[in-house]
Amino acid sequence: MNSLQRSYQRNISLSLWLQVFANFGIATLWILYLTQQGMSMVEIGLLESVRQLTSLIFEVPSGVLADRFSYKSNLIISRVLAASSALLMIYATNFWGFAIAMIVAALSSNFESGTTSAFLFSSLTALKRQSEFLRYNSWMSGVLEVTVALGQMCAGFFAHRGLVKTYWISLAFTAVTLILIGFLKEPEDRVKEKEPHTSIISILKNVGVAFKQTPLLLRWMVQYSFFLSLLLLFDFYYQSQMNALSGWLISVIMLIGTLIDLLGVWIGARLGSRHTSLQLLPWIVLMTGASLLLVIFKIDWLNIFIYTFANGLMAGIDPVFDNDIQQRIPANVRATMGSISSMIYSVSALIVFPAMGWLIDQFGFIHSFIGLGGFMLIGGVVLVIRNKRMSRVIGV
């Protein structure tokens, strides 16, 4: 193995460490933090809308910049913006201050979205090992789930003793990520793509060609993003109920969630080697819909089960979908295509999250999620039928 190959091999381990330090979930209890800062549920819903609208506007431009220039530059910008957002959350005193923090946080996610996966795939391609992407991406998803959950466990101890401290901790982790990014080696095919003739317009044209060459790819992305936003609703709104729980119990919930997420990633990696996300998604939707109906019993431990079970299902399906997309798009538009996928999700979330907030205000937490569970059961049945036809057309 020559020095260049060793650099690409090092990219893989560095990518895993980046997941650890960039996604340590110490600041993920932000909804609970905002309620402690006096924000109402309506204001929190509006802040989430601000974040999603920002993602919608800037998602594709950030992906295009990564394809036009370098993955490393996007990752650096992402981490600087993440640090800025943490500082704004610390010092904000009103709705507008938190809104600015949400905007900056969304921009940070935009610049990172799709870039890490594209960087990993390009590094494996340079090593002629792109067939191993699903395995490595599943590892990264597992590392992501563990680090997010570990951070959440730590945050649980601060739940009633000053969540603001979690943002200071996240700043320290961001400093480490910037050091790690400095050691990454930009894949050789990315260096060649930075030649002057690779214009932003040509990148966008190549995206259009990719959609034409892969029938129903756009519909596949839309379908996945819409149901992903539905899968995340319980995770989002259940966090607002955690004020009634003790700090140690929140940490235990996060630990249990970590184990379930890891199991989901392990199962997903094995199913993903034989089935596409197009084939698996209907069953994920059906199982989530059935679990949501359990809120009717108004039992705390059942709500905790729903919270961890739904997250485990998402942890399992996400790397499979990512692998499906990466395997079907050309190298020169990987980050852009990832950004388009994230943009589609932002459109869905921009509609779905405020709508669920309104339903909860009107009909209550329990009735709203019973309705969502019923809707997802119907949607899952429809997906079983439609996705069989799509699979035949796409040839998967």
Image (cartoon, rainbow, N blue to C red):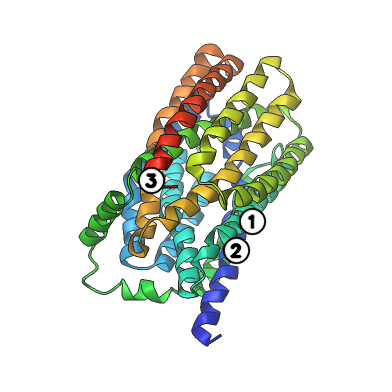
The answer to whether 46 is drawn above or below residue 270 in the figure is: above
**Residue at 32% across / 46% down in the picture?**
215
Residue identifier under label 3? 394
Residue type highlighted by circle 3: Ile
How many residues crowd mark 2 within 10 Å: few (<14), some (14–19), many (20+)? many
Front-most of residues 55 and 289:
289
Image height of 122 relative to 317, above or below: below
Name the residue rendered at 77%, 40% in the picture: 252
Please state which of residues 156 and 224 is positioned toward the viewer in this rendering.
224
Cα distance between the residues tagged 2 and 1 = 7 Å
Query: Residue 316, relative to residue 186: is it above or below?
Result: above
Residue 394 appears left or right of 42: left
User: Which residue position is annotated with label 1?
Assistant: 143
Q: CA distance from mark 1 to mark 3?
A: 31 Å
The first of marks 2 and 3 along the sequence is 2
State which tag comes first along the sequence, 2 or 1. 2
Left or right: 338, with 178 as reference point: left
- Specify whether residue 95 is in view: no
Q: Is residue 81 left or right of residue 14?
A: left
Q: Which residue has dot 2 on it?
A: 16
